[in-house]
Image (cartoon, helix red, strand yellow):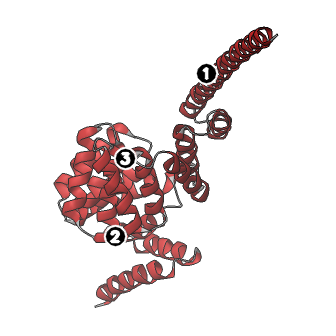
Amino acid sequence: MMMKIVALFSIRMILFLLCLVQVSECVAQSAEDAESQAYQKIYEGNILMDKGLYEPAIAAYQEATTLVPNDPKPYYYMSFLYAELGRLSEAKIFVEKALQIWPLYPEAHALLGAIYLQNQAFERAFSELNFAITQKYEQPSALNNLGGYYLLHKNNMDSAIYFFCETVRLDSAFSDAYINLSNAYLHKKAVADAMIAAQKALQLSPENPDVYFSLANAYFLDGKYEEAEKLYRKTANQDSSLIAVHYNLGRALLANEKMDESQKECDYLRGNGFIKLSELLQEEISEVRAMRLK
């Protein structure tokens, strides 16, 4: 009787172990299926992102996170698109989730740095961007944003120019980096270099109003006021929300002895609540008017 019990127990153990193996295989297969579905969703999201369909892309990445919650990539992609949409709070949430999963994720640190830069949290931006390039230097966007940190916050044009040059060395089609490089050269009054960088940006992004604004500034500094005026007008026609262009256009008009038109730009600034710029332009107009009366 004892032998039969042992034999029965052994058979049950074998059946139990076989069952465990089958369950493990099912779990493994289920995990593989979930991973496969997740990567399909990520692929769909990437296609939608390339088409500029950001909201559907975000939805695809969101589905991927439910299938592979410990993969940082879909969280990173979601963050990137939220940042592109200007929804920085949501972008920050998802990039931080990606970094919780993979603390050394270099692209995620670069993206978080860009978000801090947009929010003018400059030192936190620098910390993230600097860490990003120590992990992986070949990140043009991180280098470009480091240049922006030195341009916007530190007023250190030499460092800004260095990082913008590094950006275009790694990515010669990065038009925004050429615009930034042009602006940094303009701060140093290196007009010829600024013009070269702006012309390169123009080749890459002929519809970008920032390119024409940068070129116009270069012409203005070079004393070519008619060319500057034309490009300021073109910039304003493309994007009237660029308030600085109205101030600069007013100055170019004044230099071209078109005082009445310059006054209109001054009034436009005042009417839209940009009192300080309006006062600065009005002061220049008044000086020219006083000189004419002498």
Mark 1 and mark 3 in contact (Cβ < 8 Å)? no
* Structural crowding at the residue carrying mark 1, measured as other residues with C-alpha within 10 Å and reported as few (<14), some (14–19) or many (≥20): few
**What is the C-alpha distance between the residues marked 3 and 2?**
18 Å
**What is the C-alpha distance between the residues marked 2 and 1?**
48 Å
Give the percent coordinates (x, y) of residue 10.
72, 13
Q: Which residue is mark 1?
A: 32
For the C terminus, the image quarter is: bottom left
* Structural crowding at the residue carrying mark 2, measured as other residues with C-alpha within 10 Å and reported as few (<14), some (14–19) or many (≥20): some
Q: Amino acid at mark 2?
A: His
- Pick out the residue farthest to the bottom: 294
Give the percent coordinates (x, y) of residue 205.
39, 40
Q: Which residue is mark 2?
A: 153
Residue 278 seen by the camera: yes
Q: Nearer the viewer, residue 149 or 215?
A: 149
Q: Which mark is nearer the camera, 3 or 1?
A: 1
Taking the spot 40% from the left edge, 62% from the top edge, the residue there is 125
Q: Which residue is mark 3?
A: 141
First in sequence: mark 2 vs mark 1: 1
Residue 172: mark: none
Q: Is residue 277 above or below residue 214?
A: below
Taking the spot 35% from the left edge, 43% from the top edge, the residue there is 175
For the N terminus, the image quarter is: top right
Q: Quadrant of residue 180?
A: bottom left
